[in-house]
Amino acid sequence: MKKFISRTQSLNWCQKIFVILLFSLVAFFSLNYSGFCFAQMRYLSNEEKIRLVFEYQNNRTKMPVETTDKGTQYYEQVKYKNFEEFVKMNPNCCQINPGGGYDTPPPDFLERITGFDAHDVIVTNFEMRYLDEKGNQKSRAIKFENTLQNCGAIMY
């Protein structure tokens, strides 16, 4: 440590600014890579991440349903009243990075260091409620895999 301090004392002001700038950039990109949200100056909790994905999925108007005879059809979703109702009706619904292959593309290094991809995959398994062509309420088990940005915006 003493050698480092003595070496930095012998640097001129331009070199010192460069070293400070370099350390600042490394710290910034390292925090982004680790999932830090600079807009809120904190890491998002797992519950916040799950809530954000719930809000995104619950606010969709049309939901995809695989049918045997017509392929993928889009039906009007019957929304959950709130997150608490969703969790009550779908216990053990949600996991973060449970392992295994995902339908989301792998993050690249540039996306990670810029905070565009937090590298967390939030997997939700739940009963999707929807109205069929005749207006009857139906439900189907469905699985979504979503990826978030560092501050919680949905990517995929």
Image: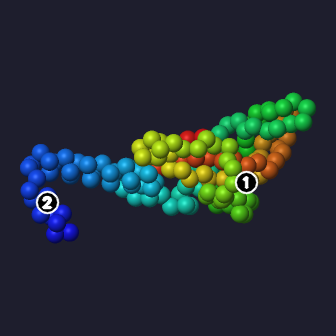
Q: Nearer the viewer, mark 1 or mark 2?
A: 2
Looking at the image, which residue sits at the far bottom? 2
Which of these two is toward me, 78 or 67? 67
Mark 2 surroundings within 10 Å by alpha-carbon count, few (fewer than 14), some (14 through 19), many (20 or more): few
Check disc 2 and give the amino acid type.
Answer: Arg
Q: Quadrant of residue 83?
A: bottom right
Residue at horizontal 73%, vertical 44%? 78
Depth order, front residue of 126/111: 111
Answer yes or no: is residue 154 visible: no
Q: Is residue 24 above or below residue 77?
A: below
Q: Residue at x 85, y 41 (%)?
A: 136
Tag 1 and tag 2, C-beta contact below 8 Å: no
Q: Identify the residue position indicated by label 2 in the image.
A: 7
* Residue 14: quadrant of the picture: top left
156 lies left or right of 43: right
User: Residue 91 location in percent, x, y?
Assistant: 72, 63
Specify the quadrant that holds the N terminus.
Answer: bottom left
> In this view of the protein, which residue sits in the foreground, 153 or 62?
153
